[in-house]
Amino acid sequence: MKFNMDIKNLKKQKNRSRKLFILFGFLLILFFVSYFILSLQKDITPQQRAELQELKEKIREVQNSKEDLKDVIEIRKEWQKEGVSLEDKLLNLGLIVPHDMWLTKIEMEDFNESQNKKKKKAAVSNKGLSIKGQLLSSNKPLNTVTDFIASLADQPAFSSDFKYPSLTSFGLSKENPKIVNFELQMERK
């Protein structure tokens, strides 16, 4: 009988040692896999770090653009409530643009807000249109721009909703001296 008990004890010990061996092996494998994964994460090359930083900057730009788009949508909704039709204005704008001029950007913006962000002050809202464009410098560019401003002021689609356009920027392009850049602002009435 004692011999049978020893066999049973041996079997139990063998099973325990097998279980301990399997557990130890599993923990050892888990340790090496974790070490391998962590070592891969530490081995980010400077190029990958630069790409990661670039992606983070692009994400910030997209988030800022998203905020700007929300502001534009808010202005657009407000203008629609007031009966301002941007489609008619864009159609009329296309009809009065001189042949040697091209528009590069048309924005709805709050002029005071952009000025006050620089000054960090709060102010009354002053919404309007900002029109940026370019033209060839060889064809009396200032006369062309002033004629365009007069045409805008004479258009009922613009004069009914906006004050007289003001020229806020005018000068030769830094990239190409044959091109003149300009910017107009038209405040809401």
Image: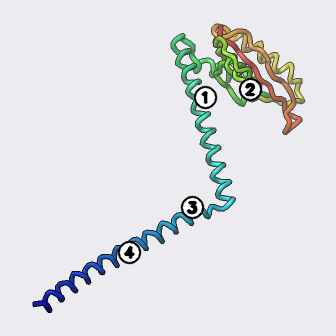
Assign the C terminus to one quadrant of the image: top right
CA gap, disc 4 to disc 1?
Answer: 58 Å
Instruction: Tell me which label, 3 or 1, sits earlier in the chain.
Output: 3
> Of the residues tagged 3 and 2, which is closer to the observer?
3
Instruction: Tell me which label, 3 or 4, sits earlier in the chain.
Output: 4
Amino acid type at image mark 1:
Asp
Tell me the residue at 64%/21% (across/down): 108
Assign the N terminus to one quadrant of the image: bottom left
The residue pinned by badge 3 equals 41
The residue pinned by badge 2 equals 132
Q: Work out whether residue 51 or residue 168 is closer to the camera in this orientation and state it.
A: 51
Image quarter for residue 146? top right
Q: Is residue 97 above or below residue 164?
A: below
Residue 134 appears at what percent x and percent y?
A: 79, 29
Amino acid type at image mark 4:
Phe
Element under label 3?
Answer: helix
**As drawn, is 103 to the left or to the right of 13?**
right
> Of the residues tagged 3 and 4, which is closer to the observer?
4
The residue pinned by badge 4 equals 24
* Residue neighbourhood size for the residue with mark 2, other residues' Cα within 10 Å, grouped as few (<14), some (14–19), many (≥20): many
Element under label 4?
Answer: helix
Instruction: Tell me which label, 3 or 2, sits earlier in the chain.
Output: 3
CA gap, disc 3 to disc 2?
Answer: 47 Å
Image quarter for residue 110? top right
Element under label 2?
Answer: strand
CA gap, disc 3 to disc 4?
Answer: 26 Å
Image quarter for residue 85? top right
